[in-house]
Image (cartoon, helix red, strand yellow):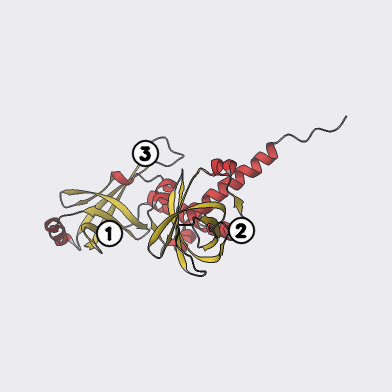
Amino acid sequence: MQTHADLHAQYENETASINQFAQARMGLKPGQTSVKIDTYNIVCVPYRLSMNGAVLIASFSREELAFFQRYVNGLAGLTLIFQPASAQNPLKIFARCFLKSVSTMQGRESIGLLDVAFKPCPPDLLSILVDHFMLLDRLKVEYDDYKGKSISVNPDSAKAMGYNNYAMLVYDGTQTKVALFALASDSLDFLVPMNGPVLEQDRPVQMKLFFQSFQFTVPGSLSSVARLQNGVQKVRATIRFSCELVSIIEQYRFSERFSAKAAPPPAQPS
């Protein structure tokens, strides 16, 4: 059995991207995050979190950015609010920090990035991060387990998975709405309308998927493209690991197994 020290050593160099999935699983309230620098409280949004520190997004004017850059290499305080699923009340975490840098996001001058190092990482935050990294490790194992095991997308399965029957293909800089008819952890099968782009096998693509729980983008490549008699293209894309998609498949498979166990046995002939 792994100890806290083992887990710390295992994940101390891992970084969590704070996307919609991470916010939901951690219970993070991103709009309630703030950094205190000197007497100033800066409202910000977590961008990345690790056991060593955080990168946070804030909105700055050019003058404000230059002003706060004067505090680089000084002390700061980070306040994070979490609402764990198992807790009735929010969890407020305060971390003493060292301000490493204040810079702009590339290509977006009004967006500032605050990079802070923890002195040290608060125990509650450490526990939340370890749980999250362990979840990602488990989902990566399930990504391999669910490979090639397609789920047909029909009204029943779409309802069970919370799929909004909306998917977009991003190919060569253009976006096209497509009809998803099957999915697995490593592949998506869909139809491209007649007025869609002419696709070439092995080309890179991105798929935007819209579920009730998450809306996310999955990178991949076109593994097969066939044009049907009606002009529609039937396509399979091989996709990379997506924690959102694997989590949705995991819940669907669990529900499927539970429903099968709960179903009454067939009636015996008299």
Disc 2 element: helix
Residue type marked 1: Val
Residue 116: assigned label: 1
Mark 3 residue element: loop
SS at mark 1 in the image: strand
Q: CA distance from mark 1 to mark 3?
A: 23 Å
The disc, 1 or 2, on the residue closer to the chain's N-terminal end is: 1
Give residue 104's quadrant in the image: bottom left
Image position, residue 128 (x, y; %):
42, 50
| Disc on res. 270 | none
Q: Position of residue 160 (x, y in %)?
A: 56, 41
Mark 3 or 2, closer to the camera:
2
Location of the N terminus by quadrant is bottom right
Number of residues whose C-alpha sits closer than 10 Å to that of mark 1, classed few (under 14), some (14–19) or many (20 or more): many
For the residue pair 69 and 161, the one nearer the viewer reads as 161
**Which residue in the structure is indicated by mark 3?**
90
Q: Which residue is mark 2?
A: 145
> Residue 118 sits in which quadrant?
bottom left
Q: Residue at x 19, y 62 (%)?
A: 72
Please count the marks in the image.
3
Give the CA distance from mark 1 to mark 2. Answer: 38 Å
